[in-house]
């Protein structure tokens, strides 16, 4: 049920974006640099685009900046999780080695397995 609600929401958003694009097809002049600076740098100063491309481009650019910002902010947490995972694996290997040493001198394999299962609880 939740999946259908999600698809319905995405369809409504897609339809709204199509209507936005159809309603804002008129050309807009976009200036990248102030008047004096573009002459000094020698770069083209303006470009004509449909208004809906400017709106949707701003939304996409904002989302990308937000995703990158969040990814950089969470780097410390991901690094700590990797360190803890490695420490856990190291400790698990050490426990297995200690269990193996504890049962080395036992003649009966079944008794050794029973001891392993008791210590695992």
Image: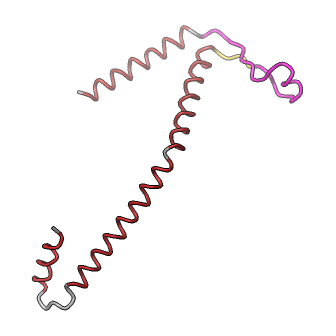
Question: How far across and down, in percent of the image, does residue 72 sit?
Answer: 54, 44
Q: Is residue 19 left or right of residue 52?
A: left
Position of 103 with respect to 59 (left or right) is left
Residue 11 x %, y % = 38, 20
Image coordinates for residue 95, horizontal then vertical, percent: 28, 74
Decide if residue 30 is on the left or right side of residue 92.
right
Q: How many numbered badges does the structure rendering display?
A: 0
- The N terminus lies in quadrant: top left
User: Is 90 rendered above or below residue 79?
Assistant: below
Q: Which residues are magenta?
A: 25-46
Q: Quadrant of the C terminus?
A: bottom left
> Is 23 included in the stretch rendered in magenta?
no
In-front residue for pair 74/21: 74
Residue under the image location 40 percent in, 60 percent down: 84
The quadrant in which residue 120 appears is bottom left
Identified at 75% across, 23% down, the residue is: 32
Residue in view at x 38 percent, y 23 percent = 10
Q: Residue 64: percent from the left, percent from the top?
A: 55, 33
Q: Is residue 88 above or below residue 26?
A: below
Q: Is residue 36 left or right of residue 1?
A: right
């Amino acid at each position: 049920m939740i999946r259908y609600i999600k698809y319905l929401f995405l369809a409504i958003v897609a339809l709204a974006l199509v209507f936005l694009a159809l309603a804002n097809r008129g050309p807009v002049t976009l200036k990248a640099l102030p008047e004096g600076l573009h002459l000094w740098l020698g770069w083209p100063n303006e470009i004509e685009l449909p208004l809906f491309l400017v709106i949707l481009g701003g939304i996409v650019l904002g989302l990308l900046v937000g995703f990158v910002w969040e990814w950089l902010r969470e780097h410390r947490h991901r690094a700590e999780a990797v360190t803890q995972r490695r420490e856990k694996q190291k400790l698990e290997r050490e426990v297995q080695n200690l269990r193996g040493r504890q049962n080395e001198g036992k003649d009966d394999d079944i008794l050794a397995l029973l001891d392993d299962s008791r210590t695992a609880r």
